[in-house]
Image (cartoon, rainbow, N blue to C red):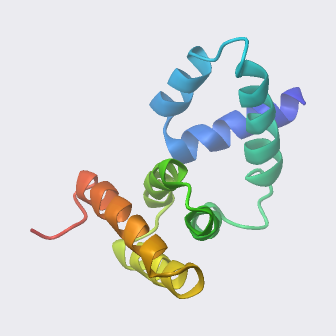
Amino acid sequence: MNELFEKGLKKRRATLGADYVDNTMAHADQLNRPFQEAMTAWCWGFGWGDDVIDEKTRSMMNLSMIGALGKMTEWELHCNGAIRNGCSLEEIRAIVHVIGIYCGVPQALECMRVARKVLDEHNMLDD
């Protein structure tokens, strides 16, 4: 598991940002530390560590799935990660359109609100 954890930590930092990940790990406690370690090894080491799917495509898939689940805190985190992994405003917009088609307009509107916030923070929206 140590090898997967180290691989996962590297992938997680690259996508979510080293500051975010390091802060999360530094503040892990007896309740959530085992989960953080297992999730880093499994999700990020085993899942994201499989190079068959590139990071940008994986980010696009994640936005679609997390959007479908309606987990907006995670969607915002992964929207930032998708931008770090090379997703453009147009690609994020297209993902939100697909979420609207398959998950409904109210969910697409939630994703659009969060996307606007994230894209604005990255200075990707025209004034």
Q: Residue furthest left?
A: 127
Residue 89 image point, x, y percent: 35, 72
Q: Is residue 40 at least partly visible in the picture?
A: yes
Foreground pick, 33 / 72: 72
The residue most toward the bottom is 101
Q: Using the image, determine if residue 5 lies above or below residue 79.
A: above
Q: Position of residue 68 (x, y in %)?
A: 60, 69
- Please state if 127 lies on the left or on the right of 75 as rendered: left
Q: Residue at x 72, y 17 (%)?
A: 31
Task: Give the quarter of the image for residue 25.
Answer: top right
Specify whether residue 7 is in view.
Answer: no
Residue at x 77% of width, y 50% of height: 49
Q: Residue furthest right?
A: 1
Of 1 and 75, the residue lying toward us: 75
The residue that appears at 51% across and 22% down in the rendered structure is: 23
Q: Quadrant of the C terminus?
A: bottom left
Q: How many marks?
A: 0
Answer above or below: position of 116 versus 28: below
Position of 21 with respect to 33 (left or right) is left
Name the residue rendered at 43%, 74% in the picture. 106
Residue lying furthest top? 30
Camera-side residue: 51 or 70?
70
Q: How far from the left and from the top, in percent, is residue 86?
A: 47, 64
Against 46, residue 20 (above or below) is above
Q: Is residue 76 above or below residue 45?
A: below
**Quarter of the image containing the N terminus?**
top right
